[in-house]
């Protein structure tokens, strides 16, 4: 849910197939059918990885890839290009404008998924790590467990996703709308005030006594995981690390 993949593909059937298989792997998927529309939307918000078709209406995939590489904010965006062109000269052209990988249609869906995983491991290792840590809080994605200073914290499914979302990007301020998209998904309507309710529940669960609140409220903007909290190791964690061989 928290790893976002944009698929720019004008073949409806293929777009549906890619969305289904990628969502089955736990990714949040946004399918765009035109190159010019993708260009505008990617200026507003970048995904973690882009799957880009070569031939698109409005703006070709090759030109879109070239533009993305010229922008500072997207110059390192992982891009996999899809195309029916299998000639060596065309593959070279796709890679020369900035694509990181190249898949020729028709392709094996499991192979594409494997390429996606491999690229995320290289470019966004924090997105696939099973364990996240911030300050004295540890989050285990695989077993859905959260601990603070060694004690178990019981979180509901939504609060767990919120904590995971914050811990992936310490210091970044997320608006309520961004939190709704990242945690609840774009296909579900939830009032923005619901975000405040669940952030309140999360704070109540993770904070005890005089413990420092790791979640920072930014007036008029949204919420963030305090980067100073994230950078601080607790004495409990230091003790555990010293005890390890």
Image (cartoon, rainbow, N blue to C red):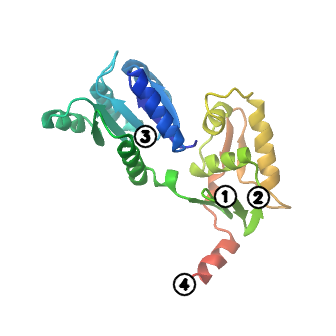
Instruction: Provide the residue designation for mark 3.
Output: 49
Answer with the quarter of the image where residue 18 lies. top left
Q: Which residue is painted at 60% across and 81% down in the image? A: 242
Between disc 3 and disc 1, the foreground one is 3
SS of the residue under disc 4: loop
Q: Residue at x 68, y 45 (%)?
A: 162
Q: Which residue is mark 4?
A: 245
Tell me what residue is drawn at x 34 percent, y 40 percent. 108
Q: Are marks 1 and 2 in contact (CB under 8 Å)?
A: yes
Question: CA gap, disc 2 to disc 3?
Answer: 34 Å
| Vertical order, 31 against 141 (above or below) | above
Q: Between disc 4 and disc 3, whose residue precedes?
A: 3
- Mark 3 residue crowding within 10 angstroms, few (<14) / some (14–19) / many (20+): many
Provide the residue designation for mark 1. Answer: 229
Residue 245 place in picture, x, y as percent: 54, 84
Question: Label 2: which residue?
Answer: 212
Where disc 1 sits, the SS reads helix
Q: Nearer the viewer, mark 1 or mark 4?
A: 4
C-alpha span from label 3 to label 1: 28 Å
Mark 1 vs mark 2, CA separation in Å? 8 Å
Taking the view exactly as shown, the residue that stands out farthest to the top is 58
Q: Which quadrant of the view contains residue 32? A: top left
**Residue 175 horizontal side relative to residue 47, left or right:** right
Tag 1 or tag 3, which sits nearer the N-term? 3
């Amino acid at each position: 849910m928290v790893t976002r993949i944009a698929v720019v593909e004008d073949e409806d059937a293929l777009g549906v197939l890619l969305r289904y298989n990628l969502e089955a792997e736990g990714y949040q998927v946004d399918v765009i059918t035109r190159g010019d529309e993708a260009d505008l939307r990617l200026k507003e918000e970048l995904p973690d990885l882009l799957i880009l078709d070569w031939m698109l209406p409005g703006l070709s995939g090759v030109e879109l890839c070239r533009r993305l590489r010229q922008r500072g904010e997207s110059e390192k965006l992982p891009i996999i290009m899809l195309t029916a062109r299998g000639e060596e000269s065309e593959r070279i052209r796709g890679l020369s404008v900035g694509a990181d990988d190249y898949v020729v249609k028709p392709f094996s869906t499991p192979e594409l998924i494997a390429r996606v995983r491999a690229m995320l491991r290289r470019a966004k290792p924090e997105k696939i790590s099973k364990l996240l840590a911030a300050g004295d809080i540890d989050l285990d994605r695989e077993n859905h467990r959260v601990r603070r200073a060694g004690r178990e914290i019981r979180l509901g499914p939504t609060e767990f996703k919120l904590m995971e979302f914050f811990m992936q990007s310490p210091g970044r301020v997320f608006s309520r709308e961004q939190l709704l998209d990242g945690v609840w998904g774009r296909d579900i309507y939830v009032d923005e005030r619901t975000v405040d309710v669940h952030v309140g529940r999360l704070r109540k669960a993770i904070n005890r006594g005089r413990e420092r609140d790791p979640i920072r409220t930014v007036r008029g903007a949204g919420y963030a995981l305090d980067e100073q909290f994230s950078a601080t190791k607790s004495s409990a964690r230091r003790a555990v690390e010293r005890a390890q061989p």
